[in-house]
Image (spheres, helix red, strand yellow):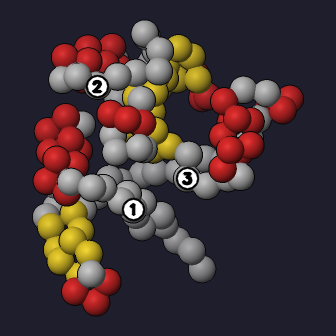
């Protein structure tokens, strides 16, 4: 029986830069680095409690997911980090040079404010920030 989402793996060209991004820029708890000789990989972990798997499909065959499916046929689409002050996080990350797909957060699923960071700012991974309304 599947009991939890254990991890999401992201291939990165510069491990140290990526560690700094998740630790310093996103403020995630860093639990260290480990070389896995058998897989010929160096790994770094940032454990986060409470997560969900979100399945996304184009509404009425339209929108950005439709384009994504046309191009790639499916796959990992984005990571989403919950924020307790999305406007402050956007401002802080913009100051660090992150590019966003929109100027400001908009309303998304579950009555949350959402904004996406451009994939080229994060080694090709689309990252969403969300803030559930009522959490300030």
Which residue in the structure is indicated by mark 1?
9
Q: Where is 21 relative to 41, above or below?
A: above
Expressed as whole percent of the image width and height from the top left, the position of residue 65 reads 68, 36
Q: Residue at x 31, y 19 (%)?
A: 90
Answer with left or right where residue 104 lies relative to residue 44. Answer: right
Answer with left or right where residue 72 lies relative to residue 106. Answer: right
Mark 1 touches mark 2? (CB < 8 Å):
no
Question: Is there any visible trace of residue 19 in the rendered image?
Answer: no
The earlier-in-sequence mark between 1 and 2 is 1
Q: SS of the residue at dot 1? A: loop
Question: Dot 1: within a 10 Å radius of its alpha carbon, few (fewer than 14), some, or many (20 or more) residues?
Answer: few
Q: Residue furthest top?
A: 103
Which mark, by number, is residue 98?
2
Quadrant housing residue 32: bottom left
Expressed as whole percent of the image width and height from the top left, the position of residue 93 reads 24, 23
Q: Where is 55 relative to 6, above or below?
A: above
Q: Work out how far the residue at label 1 is from the one at label 2, CA to CA, in angstroms.
A: 21 Å
Question: Is there any visible trace of residue 126 in the rendered image?
Answer: yes
Answer with left or right where residue 13 lies relative to residue 81. Answer: left
Q: Residue at x 15, y 67 (%)?
A: 33
Expressed as whole percent of the image width and height from the top left, the position of residue 70 reads 74, 43
The earlier-in-sequence mark between 3 and 2 is 3
Q: Residue at x 43, y 10 (%)?
A: 104
Depth check: give the residue in front, 95 or 90.
Answer: 95
The earlier-in-sequence mark between 1 and 3 is 1
Q: Work out how far the residue at label 1 is from the one at label 3, CA to CA, in angstroms.
A: 10 Å
Expressed as whole percent of the image width and height from the top left, the position of residue 124 reads 41, 44
Which residue in the structure is indicated by mark 3?
76
Q: Residue at x 13, y 53 (%)?
A: 16
Q: SS of the residue at dot 3? A: loop
Q: SS of the residue at dot 2? A: loop
């Amino acid at each position: 029986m599947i009991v939890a989402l254990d991890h999401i793996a992201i291939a990165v060209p510069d491990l140290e830069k990526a560690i700094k991004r998740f630790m310093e820029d996103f403020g995630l708890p860093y639990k260290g680095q480990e070389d896995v000789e058998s897989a010929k990989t160096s790994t770094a972990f940032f454990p986060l409690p409470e997560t969900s798997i979100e399945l996304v499909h184009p509404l009425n065959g339209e929108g950005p997911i439709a384009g994504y499916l046309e191009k790639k046929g499916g796959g990992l689409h984005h990571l989403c980090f919950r924020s307790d002050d999305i406007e402050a996080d956007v401002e802080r990350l913009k100051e660090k040079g992150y590019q966003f797909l929109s100027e400001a957060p908009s309303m998304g699923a579950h009555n949350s404010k959402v904004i996406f960071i451009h994939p080229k700012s994060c080694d090709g991974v689309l990252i969403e920030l969300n803030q559930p309304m009522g959490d300030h």
